[in-house]
Image (spheres, grey):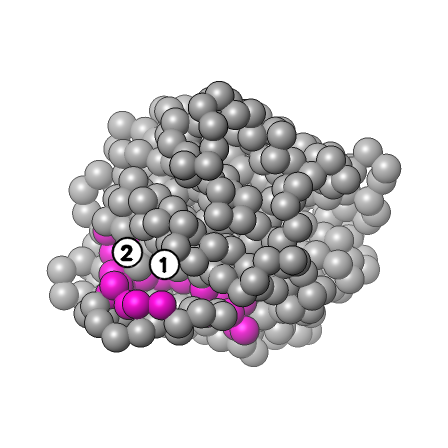
Amino acid sequence: MCDTVCGLGPRGAVFAKNSDRPPAEVQLVRGVGGRPAGGRLATQYLDIPDAGSAATLLSQPTWLWGAEHGVNEHRVAIGNETVWTTLDAAAQPDGLIGMDLVRLGLERGTTATEALEAMTDLLSTWGQGGLADAIDQQAYFSSFLLCDPTSAWILETSGRSWAAKPVEDRAALSNRLTLRDDWRRASPDVAPGTDLDTWRDPAVPTGLADGRLAASRRFLDGQGADLAPAAVAAHLRDHGQGPWGAPGSPGRVDPPPTELLDDWTGMSVCMHLAGAMATTSSMVVELPVDGPWRGWVAPGSPCVSVYLPVLGPSGDRPAVVPEAVGDDGLWHRLAELRDRVQAEPGRLDEVRQVLDPLEGDAWAEAEALGDDGAAWAPAAAGWCGRLAQSLGRLGV
């Protein structure tokens, strides 16, 4: 389960994703430097020729080589979504999994279109196959949202088959196929005019994604020409009642849902299916037409976490990434806090009273620092220290 959005505007693009995974599966964010082409590359299940890599920021479940989402030095961002098709994913031989393709697209694409071409060439050559959820022992196929400062693509897949559509201005994905016969590119086996809804597995109800997809589309429809990253962060905290908790102007606090109803109410953008699925990492990325990208990463579930600012690379300077977003121990503390709030939803008010001032200060300080990487490093260390202290105040 996941939810991904992007928007193209006059000043560039904004990309964002909530990664929903098994609640106990650790997911950390780390910067990875570039490497030259040559030799072999060990993906999750396959060794393939190494075409080299751009520098990337990756959000990774710690047992995976690939990534749930990320951004590269060329200001390309990609995220994937689980989808269910009539082809049995569990019956496929080992190949590339969706998270491999996210990372490979980021490593090889200087634009969203170049990343799309790299990913679809890899699909054609290697196919999809292998467990993508080790806890629940599940294999699945993926859809993808690819975005750069001026363009974006939706890519949907079933095994080696794929179809893609360019994004006009805004797009949202959740856990269902969304393309019909409106795709613009496809693998050779997809006949002209094919309705991708014929790929959909009728045994898997679309209701598990429809509500979240509608919430994301409503949010996007209500925004101005340029998406505001703080507004996007508030959307990623949606517990079924709409956006809340925008960094810097938090306002009301919406507690998480307590049960999943027959109409799928309770399956929200900020995911809280106790014992089954939770948002384990969240990211918002601003992709300007000029200058380095900026990101905001919330380790764990965004409702009980802080979106910490990240500065993208520029020239020889690497990205400035707060250590907290890659800290296993801190991730577990935030997971404990999430579980406490799920058991007692009213406690979320107390949590936000402690975390909101830190988040607002971090966003304001990052804005004031501009692209001064030397000043960002000590500032990021300060945000991480305050977050650890704040969690101590909350008893985790």
- Describe residue 114's horizontal placement relative to residue 101 as left or right: left
Q: State how far apart marks 2 and 1 are (Cα).
A: 6 Å
Residue at far left of view:
315
Q: Report x, y in % for residue 362.
A: 40, 57
Question: Mark 2 highlights which residue?
Answer: 108
| Local SS, label 2 | helix
Of residues 285 and 242, the one drawn nearer to the viewer in this rendering: 285
The residue that appears at 63% across and 46% down in the rendered structure is: 87
**Residue 309 picture quarter:** bottom left
What residue occupies the far bottom of the structure in this picture? 329
> Are the residues flagged by discs 2 and 1 in contact, CB closer than 8 Å?
yes
Element type where label 1 sits in the image: helix
Q: Is residue 218 magenta?
A: no
Q: Quadrant of the C terminus?
A: bottom right
Residue drawn at 72 percent across, 52 percent down: 272
Q: Amino acid at mark 1?
A: Leu
Span highlighted in magenta in the image? 48-76
User: Which residue: 32% across, 29% down?
Assistant: 9
Disc 1: CA contacts within 10 A as few (<14), some (14-19) or many (>=20): many
Residue 61 painted magenta: yes
- Count of numbered circles in the view: 2
**Amino acid type, label 2:** Arg
Residue, disc 1: 104
In percent of width and height, residue 265 lies at 78, 37
Residue 182 can be seen in this image: yes
Q: Residue 228: name its quadrant.
A: top left
